[in-house]
Image (spheres, coloured by chain):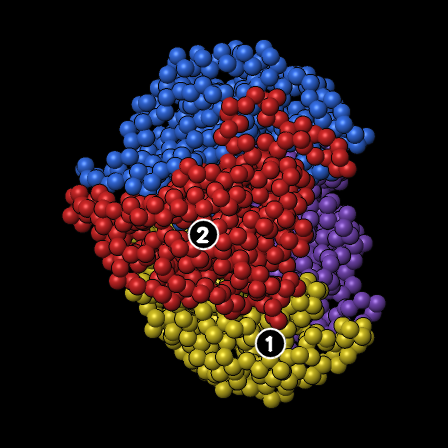
Chain colours: A blue, B red, C yellow, D purple
Amino acid sequence: MFSFGEKIKIQIFGQSHSDSIGVVIDGLPAGEKIDMDALSAFLKRRAPGRNEHSTMRKEPDIPDFISGLVDGKTCGAPVCAVIQNKDTRSGDYTFLADIPRPGHSDYPAFVKYGGHNDIRGGGQFSARLTAALCIAGGIFAQLLEKKGIYAGAHIQEIHGIKDESFNPVSVSKDILKTVTAKDFPVIDDEKGKLMRREILSAQEIRDSVGGIIELAVVGLPVGVGSHMFGGIENRIAAAMFAVPAVKGIEFGAGFSAANLYGSENNDSYYFDGGIKTKTNNSGGVLGGMTTGMPLLMRVAFKPTPSIAAKQESVSLSEKKNAVLEIVGRHDPCVVPRAVPCAESAALIALGDMIL
Amino acid sequence: MFSFGEKIKIQIFGQSHSDSIGVVIDGLPAGEKIDMDALSAFLKRRAPGRNEHSTMRKEPDIPDFISGLVDGKTCGAPVCAVIQNKDTRSGDYTFLADIPRPGHSDYPAFVKYGGHNDIRGGGQFSARLTAALCIAGGIFAQLLEKKGIYAGAHIQEIHGIKDESFNPVSVSKDILKTVTAKDFPVIDDEKGKLMRREILSAQEIRDSVGGIIELAVVGLPVGVGSHMFGGIENRIAAAMFAVPAVKGIEFGAGFSAANLYGSENNDSYYFDGGIKTKTNNSGGVLGGMTTGMPLLMRVAFKPTPSIAAKQESVSLSEKKNAVLEIVGRHDPCVVPRAVPCAESAALIALGDMIL
Amino acid sequence: MFSFGEKIKIQIFGQSHSDSIGVVIDGLPAGEKIDMDALSAFLKRRAPGRNEHSTMRKEPDIPDFISGLVDGKTCGAPVCAVIQNKDTRSGDYTFLADIPRPGHSDYPAFVKYGGHNDIRGGGQFSARLTAALCIAGGIFAQLLEKKGIYAGAHIQEIHGIKDESFNPVSVSKDILKTVTAKDFPVIDDEKGKLMRREILSAQEIRDSVGGIIELAVVGLPVGVGSHMFGGIENRIAAAMFAVPAVKGIEFGAGFSAANLYGSENNDSYYFDGGIKTKTNNSGGVLGGMTTGMPLLMRVAFKPTPSIAAKQESVSLSEKKNAVLEIVGRHDPCVVPRAVPCAESAALIALGDMIL
Amino acid sequence: MFSFGEKIKIQIFGQSHSDSIGVVIDGLPAGEKIDMDALSAFLKRRAPGRNEHSTMRKEPDIPDFISGLVDGKTCGAPVCAVIQNKDTRSGDYTFLADIPRPGHSDYPAFVKYGGHNDIRGGGQFSARLTAALCIAGGIFAQLLEKKGIYAGAHIQEIHGIKDESFNPVSVSKDILKTVTAKDFPVIDDEKGKLMRREILSAQEIRDSVGGIIELAVVGLPVGVGSHMFGGIENRIAAAMFAVPAVKGIEFGAGFSAANLYGSENNDSYYFDGGIKTKTNNSGGVLGGMTTGMPLLMRVAFKPTPSIAAKQESVSLSEKKNAVLEIVGRHDPCVVPRAVPCAESAALIALGDMIL
């Protein structure tokens, strides 16, 4: 399903080469001004062509709001925004009908849809649909900011090269704003340079690399979320895996908590005006609910499956092995453009619980 | 929310010290015989007291089916099963009303529910509710097995001590049955001994440890799941974080994919009767859909937050720092008993899509 | 599905002759005291045996709250209440396996469930499950009353004998409390006597009769509900048809509006402290939203399908015509006992939107 | 909420004067050809300007499919279709900001949305959105027809003038096709002439009239739907009240069953190749499930609230009584154009359960 949310429902639509992609957001509070410049800036962070190494497909990706706004304000009706797909070259992809690309959805989609899925540019499985996700994310960001809640993410790792981490107890709105404003969102720009070089190196050898995004949300009230299936972690994870190439998510100490003693992992409370914790191994969530400390998560992305090198595959029609060579435009690393996508996934999950 | 599922809805209820806990399962196919012995065996894997180091609370945990079955078969009506809470000692927990336990839900729950949440034994946040989850999981396991689908998990790591991993392409029903039948479910029993020793050592120093569970599902058809929010990973993660102490989940190569080249991470297809992949870094899921290869995931558990050592906290009423000493019965490590819980989370997500 | 609600989810379970029936209510606000005497009084209105003509099955129908309450107050955990089925005589119903009762669910249930549905006492299709619905309804009534919202209904018609109607603009909490407190809830008790006589007459000729319930809700704020699928009428109707024997629902002037001019049907606004309407043909709902005037609806019930007279049917096994004679205990009219059920359906729909 | 459906989710968007209105349908089976001519013919039945008495707003209302189709076939991605709003005259409506129209959503919408709702042309409450509903309805009709299921409706009553009724046991696909192909869909065209005259008479006196639509669905398999909240009646009613002006719905004998004995109302089974009933007072649904007999319902529509005559209302800003005169284009009767809308509501509810 391409829909998400209980209180505020998001319905995404489109394929890589359909006329348009877009999103409907149903249940937003009425009377909220959408800052189109801020939204445009948010979307630009995901747009291709910002870095030397990103895909060559050039699209302005300016959303057209065809319903839900009156004088730029929400009116209680569902907000629908669409982006036309302009720069499509469907001819590139016809061979996919028969030889599924390793690491892509081609083969299971072929089986699931009996061969009727849209193969042009990956069809409904294209990362292009994250543009629609980011429209929702950008709007939710604005509405949550009005409540003092800020989300931001940075590239924490690309193919083994690591950026610093957010300080888990003191990461702030200002730090998040600073890092997300960068063309290449890292804390330590020197590390960023190394990462970019690594991406270009991979591209030169007709290969691709993956990475990790670290994401923080500050300003959350205490007690948002619920136990069992409605927890913060459940809901964010349910949204996050909609971002293509995501293969893992952890909160706070996450997998590394498996190496800690309880006495190390537990975050001691102390009183300092309000109730805070000295450490933040919980990542700001206990029992599925926010603790009031920064919400922290790390999201793992696999390397772009589309690589220029020849790959082994099969011919679905001939039922025998085959060799595949992908021609076309592909990012050697999806992580830089995925930063606002990951933020969007977290934002729609949180916004659904808070707005 | 304590409910999950779209086609088959699961509603869990109960608190640690309520009269009973239980589950309602609405939407099961009719005419399915529930094997009570098999279910009982499944539940026993979660039950306390099986190992020397697990909590001392002794409960038979035999579910009573109060609706939905006729002569042991599903009849189309919702199945409700309850387990009475017998061995409760509410007196132990009264101090929690004021001094929240670090690493527990006490503080955010206090804020969320305005102090009205059930504090006895952790109330609705108690891991005891996983007994109800496992009833659902055990039933789904039986129904999926009839379709040739088998799930199984093992302890892959406890406080840095690692078991072997499942072979990602050849893990089989037999391997899963063998490992899950063990009292201490590991592949390499020697590693299991070291793990048990590590858990006892932690207990001796009044501390606790966490770990990682690896889970596999074999026999899945190709093309189950969907893109975006309805993917296999989205749905399983949405269920998995309902298991207390889970702080991360990854599929296939997961976080380690961030260190791989695309050419390394992509799983090449080959033809061998059917279509298979030579490696399984995708963990059996691409584009949110099953590939037909084993579905593989790893789940991170934090150390038990209840430890016997003194901890720093705050007094909610006095708004000042306070020291907490937890008296009572607690597992020094939740991971061994969490194995069938993690399986159950995966099973209810898959069953909702398949049954 | 036996579940209802978006914000507050209700899950009903049980069959006529299962061990128990019950309901889980997930999402109630915490800290709310449930008045068990008031709930008991509410349930008694539905209980059999209150009138000379109601079914002979005697059950105390006292719900046992097995989770969700601490010291009688909601604690944020799902509330589960069960009622044991004590007075069951399963032997009465075995013939139903082959010869479906006209007007009952037997035949479509046989097809839907492949013969696996519980045929004892109508199984999951039994009106007995409305006892569980009324537990939810009675709890919602209490919580809505704290907000000044009162629901009440009366028998408006039995087999052509009509009671007065509520005054659509001035019906009040007091009128609702008075009429619902009656053993036979009508406005005009003389008409009530005629109705009771009509019911007994039907019983004497081994037949049954239907009727109409009129229901009002007062004290609702303006603007509850939403356009399209989330409207007051949509949601109440979605719940109301869960009450067995309901075959129609109309709001305000309803079907009779088809005979009015717009100038007659439109409710003129006037200012009198607040904004009111002179008439209330809308039944208190416009565009799916409450207008602040009393919410008014009428619900049609068919005659009890179980009648003592011989009826024509078929033998499912022999695939030929057959004659059926139903032996057992049946109300000659379900309407009197359905009054709190209809209230409950309206209350769970409204409570889901308001609480 | 503007969304509906569990298995196939429909999300409607738009306002009367927004750039566009439209619908997203998520979950349709892949590989289904949409017959655009048939869809266009379906939509024309709802379009204005077909009769002498319908609103003067002229719009071609040709949907533009911007996603979800490849070569005219569904591809598994959500189908999004939009219709541009071209002939809008927003100037007509500005006065509505202060003086709510009786019988319209203006006043509760003002309160609900704090004055931020779109008042132009009724905004999100406009019957114009039924064009989007009919796109979904028309698509579902095609897919259900492939399974031998046909829906059709006729005007059964306009301001007291009655058409014949469908024969409840023998209404057929051919009858439905014949009646729905008519410009003015009635069984008896003589009655249709009288109805049209009645509508024009109402218009001449600056007034409006309501009516009743009878709807049948034939070819349904037995056992579709479920007990309690997921029944055929629950789901259809939940969709039907989304059609503006609907104030009541009844199935089979409906309200008139309140005047019948059980022996009269029960539909006797007999064997004739398959299992049929001699009468069809149940309207083809028992226990929430289809019986295999025609599904029959009647839907009540109030008179168009927009009338040219002066009406009493209030000034929201001045908090005093005021007089309102509505200038603009309005149907004196919505019923003729509502016929495919009612069909669409039934079709999306059934399609969600069957497709």
Vertical relation: D31 (above or below) C191: above
Q: Is residue A322 left or right of residue B286?
A: right
Q: Secondary structure at mark 1?
A: helix
Which numbered tag is attached to residue C121? Answer: 1
Answer whether residue C48 is visible to the viewer in this image: no
Q: Are marks 2 and 1 in contact (CB under 8 Å)?
A: no
Q: Count residues near mark 2 (Cα–Cα under 10 Å), then give few for <14, some for 14-19, many for 20+.
A: many
Answer whether residue C86 is visible to the viewer in this image: yes
Vertical relation: C273 (above or below) B302: below
Residue type highlighted by circle 1: Gly
Question: Residue B334 at what x, y percent from top left?
Answer: 41, 49
Residue at 25% x, 35% y is A278
Q: Is residue A221 left or right of residue B240?
A: left
Give the residue number, with chain letter if any, for mark 2.
B337
Question: Label 2 vs label 1: CA separation?
Answer: 41 Å
Question: Residue D19 at what x, y percent from top left?
Answer: 55, 29
Task: Return the residue nearer the eye: C332 or B6.
Answer: B6
